[in-house]
């Protein structure tokens, strides 16, 4: 069991480090070919497959300037983990306004790769901080 816990933690830490480094290729390398990225918020857009996910990362990382996920903790149960986080960024498509929100990732890891990420965050709070209604035209949601 200890080996699985170590692999799960290592996979999640590598994924978060790649996101924080704004390295789309490194992020995509952390996920399985059949990766499922589920968003539960109204502004989120779910994606399936490494290829689709990787294609979305470039625009996302360009629009979400200074993106930083700061995990509050990593709670692991075998190949599953919950990671409450604070995400900060400046949205280029909304005049570089700063945003700070809290959310939770729920991950599933197999063979050292993330197979599923479910993301829970409050899109209404993002809109409030941006001072706008619906997401600006062309703005990407967090992949």
Image (spheres, helix red, strand yellow):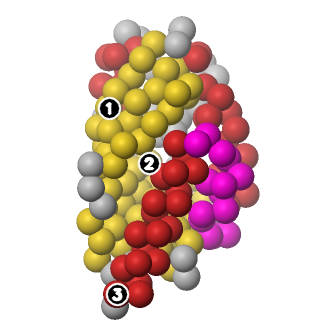
x and y percent of residue 18 in the render? 58, 50
Q: Which residue is drawn at 60% across and 65% down?
A: 31
Element type at mark 1 = strand
The residue sitting at 59% across, 16% down in the picture is 93
* Residue position for label 1: 101
Q: Does residue 82 appear in this view? A: yes
Where, quadrant-wise, is the N terminus in this rendering? Answer: bottom left
Number of numbered markers: 3
Q: As displayed, is residue 88 above or below residue 53?
A: above
**Does the magenta portion include 45?**
no
Disc 3 is placed on an element classified as helix
Mark nearer the viewer, 1 or 3: 3
To which quarter of the image does residue 73 belong? bottom left
Going 32% across and 56% down the picture, which residue do you hit? 83
Q: Which quarter shows the C terminus? A: top right
Magenta residues span 21-34
Is residue 131 shown above or below 102?
Answer: above
Residue at position x 33%, y 49% in the image: 71
Gap in angstroms between the C-alphas marked 3 and 2: 30 Å
Q: How far apart are marks 2 and 1 (CA)?
A: 15 Å
Decide which of tag 2 and tag 1 comes sooner along the chain. 2
Closer to us: mark 3 or mark 2? Answer: 3
SS class, disc 2: strand
Give the number of the disc on residue 2: 3
Whether 142 is drawn above or below 92: the answer is below
The crowding category of the residue bearing disc 2, from other C-alpha atoms within 10 Å (few below 14, some 14 to 19, many at least 20), is: many
Q: Mark 2 points at which residue?
A: 39
């Amino acid at each position: 069991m200890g080996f699985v816990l170590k692999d799960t933690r290592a996979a999640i830490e590598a994924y978060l480090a790649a996101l924080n480094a704004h390295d789309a290729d490194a992020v995509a390398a952390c996920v399985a070919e059949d990766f499922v990225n589920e968003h539960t918020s109204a502004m989120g857009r779910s994606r399936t497959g490494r290829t689709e996910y990787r294609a979305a990362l470039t625009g996302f990382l360009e629009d979400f300037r200074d993106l930083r996920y700061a995990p509050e903790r990593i709670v692991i149960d075998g190949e599953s983990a919950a990671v409450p986080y604070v995400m900060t960024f400046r949205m280029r498509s909304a005049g570089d306004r700063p945003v700070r929100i809290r959310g939770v990732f729920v991950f599933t890891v197999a063979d050292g790769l993330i197979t599923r990420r479910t993301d829970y965050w409050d899109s209404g709070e993002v809109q409030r901080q941006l001072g706008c209604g619906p997401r600006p035209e062309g703005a990407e949601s967090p992949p």
